[in-house]
Amino acid sequence: MSLTVVGSIAFDAVRTPFGERERMLGGAAVHFSLGASFFDEIRVVGPVGDDFGEAEYAVLHGRGINTDDIEHVPGGKTFFWSGVYSEDLNSRETLATDLNVFETFEPKLSDASRACDVLFLANIVPDLQIGVREQCEKARFVALDSMDLWINIARESLDRAISMVDCVILNDEELEQLTGKPNALTAAREVLSWGPTAVVAKQGKYGAALITQEGFFALPAFPMEAVVDPTGAGDSFAGGFVGYVAAHPDEEVDHALLCRAMAYGTAIASYNVQEFGTERVARLEPYEVSARVADLQRMTRFDDTPLALRA
């Protein structure tokens, strides 16, 4: 079994109240792949330029990620993003977005990538997501991420892409914008009516919520005394979440399985924010993930002894 992810591979320049990096490995497909690599064989599909070298490949290979479908564009430069985070890390200002080779990206999947058991369509043009989904006919679970840009300029294609997947992963504001509903819960219910069987509403430092036809489940973000860099946290969460599903090929993808997946996504995302970019997750060990999931389980469990309330 394998998991294929299609999305951006990038270099980021980031400044936060805790420091800065002028150039670090990033991109949705990279953060997702590292998060998912604890669970299954990962194949990553995305474009890079001549500036993407052995050091960058070593980060991916260090977690056993298959890079055969990374497309090297001769003479090109890798996608670059630069941004500055506010003092409380709740907002950020984009200083530069240079699409470079990503601007003309047309995913090229090998037979092995097309034969994936699980597929993640990271934040790319919806028409490209549709094309990849149509190539991966055998995938038993497909999840999709998107952003406000595509809601604004490619709505028809995005709606079609959403109708073709099993799970939509968006932040709460994007869900409300997409549906015109007043809150994430009613927005998620609306999206479920379009075809997916699950919606995950990312809520930043407050955690994430899972909505299916079977019910509602939410986890807080893992409590951290210091968050150094939130870049890639959402994609790391998606990697852990979707990766957990991929690791259970013989189980029905139901509400219970996805609830457990939420815990692993939350745990991995919590490590991502402890350092800049991929630095912490690249050296993360499986026992650390398991320990943090156990901590989450302990923190979110309570004594349900019935109490007689006053009339």
Image (cartoon, helix red, strand yellow):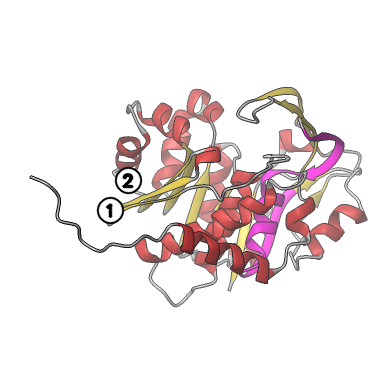
Kindly check if marks 2 and 1 are in contact, taking CB atoms under 8 A apart as contact. yes
The verdict on residue 85 being magenta is no
Going from the N terminus, do you reach mark 2 or mark 1 first?
2
Residue 165 can be seen, yes or no: no
Q: Which corner quadrant of the image does residue 128 belong to?
A: top right
Q: Quadrant of the C terminus?
A: top left
Residue 259 can be seen, yes or no: yes
Percent coordinates x, y for residue 113 in the rendering? 64, 63
Percent coordinates x, y for residue 300 in the rendering? 43, 57
Task: State the extent of the magenta-drawn residues as a range.
Answer: 18-46
Percent coordinates x, y for residue 203 in the rendering? 49, 39
Name the residue type under label 2: Leu
Name the residue type under label 1: Gln
Label 2 sits on residue: 192
Q: Disc 2 vs disc 1: which is toward the camera?
A: 1
Seen as rendered, the residue at the extreme front is: 310
Q: In this view, does 210 lie to the left or right of 226?
A: left
Percent coordinates x, y for residue 196 in the rendering? 37, 50
Q: In this view, does 308 lie to the left or right of 55?
A: left
Label 1 sits on residue: 213
Q: In which quarter of the image is the N terminus?
A: bottom right
Which one is nearer the viewer's eye here, 156 or 302?
Answer: 302
Residue at the spot 59% in from the left edge and 44% down from the top edge: 234
- For label 2, the SS is helix
Residue at the spot 45% in from the left edge and 65% down from the top edge: 140
